[in-house]
Amino acid sequence: MIKIETNKNNGMEDTMENKWIPMTSITSGKGQEVRRDIYCLPIQIVNVCFIGDVDRPNEWVLVDTGMPGCADKIIEAANDRFGENNQPKAIILTHGHFDHVGAVVDLVERWKVPVYAHELELPFLTGKLNYPEPDGTVEGGLVAKMSPMFPNESVNLGNHVAPLPSEGTIPEMPGWRWVHTPGHTPGHVSFFRDEDRSLIVGDAFVTVRQDSLYEVLTQKQEINGPPRYFTTDWQEAWDSVKKLEALKPVAAVTGHGLPMMGEELARDLRKLSAEFDRLAIPDYGRYVDGEQSKQ
């Protein structure tokens, strides 16, 4: 039985409490500046992003909040980049899986900032609906087999989370727009800036084979579809990759794996979009069997 820690003063419930997962990679803690105002920080096996110019330390946002128990690491890295006590103006979520909201309650309590996500993701962020259980039977490597130990419970942010604006803008991220990229989750979103064709992907596609323990640990760069064990609609996932490829991004920060840029990104994303059924969709699994996955 899962114990839910409740703070009655703020209406939030943190199901990520004491859910630390003992997995990491060789890049954990080694941040990378992808653009002057895009900083990718790997924490264990997942990336968070600081969006904002260091010359404007009071005008940045955090995209995703990493693994359970990593709030102090995010705060320390933010202090190093923007100076102490320069908290973000908002937290923006690509989706609500445990490795993207692991520290969200702790950070909201510390920073007192709003959180935004797609309206279809809100039930998973307000304690109303849990995600389907991860599929340990799916075709893949050791991480896929280990996935049943991963939390699928929703956090409850109460009135601290709000839907992203319906017209596609992103609060506190001028020049960016959100793109609905479902498949991995119903309300999964990616973020695109037309000016320089920068893309924050979330898990719509990743740049590491996320089901393989060895490749997760070593961060061998290889473009892949969304993590297999948590993806429940492969047709939507394929459509989402096609949608992102059509944007012709020149730099992409994914939820897992190293950032990818330039011709390598264009070539590999083009191939993934065209051959998604062969490269990404598993041959078998709970969320594959019986689905019309081919186009």
Image (spheres, grey):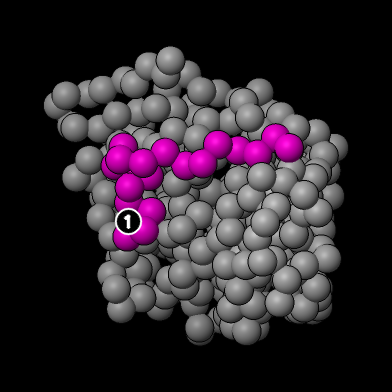
Q: Residue at x 42, y 18 (%)?
A: 2
Question: Is residue 133 part of the magenta span, yes or no?
Answer: yes
| Residue 5 makes an appearance in the image | yes
Dividing the image into 4 quarters, which one contains the C terminus?
Answer: bottom right
Direction from residue 63 to residue 144 in the image, left or right: right
Q: Nearer the viewer, residue 193 or 88?
A: 193
Whole-percent x and y of residue 155?
A: 36, 36
Whole-percent x and y of residue 91?
A: 36, 51
Provide the secondary structure element on which disc 1 rests. Answer: strand
Q: Residue at x 73, y 71 (%)?
A: 294
Determine the image quadrant of residue 217. top right
| Residue 66 makes an appearance in the image | no
Q: Label 1 crowding class (10 Å Cα cut-off): few <14, some 14-19, many 20+?
A: many
Q: Which residue is mark 1?
A: 116
In the image as oriented, which residue stretches furthest toward the front? Answer: 290
- Whether 204 is drawn above or below 110: the answer is below
Q: Nearer the viewer, residue 177 or 294?
A: 294
Q: Nearer the viewer, residue 290 or 243?
A: 290
Dominant secondary structure of the residues highlighted in magenta in the image: loop
**Which amino acid type is shown beneath numbered disc 1?**
Tyr
Determine the image quadrant of residue 121. bottom left
Direction from residue 119 to residue 158 in the image, left or right: left
- Whether 63 is drawn above or below 133: the answer is below
* Stretch in magenta: 119-137
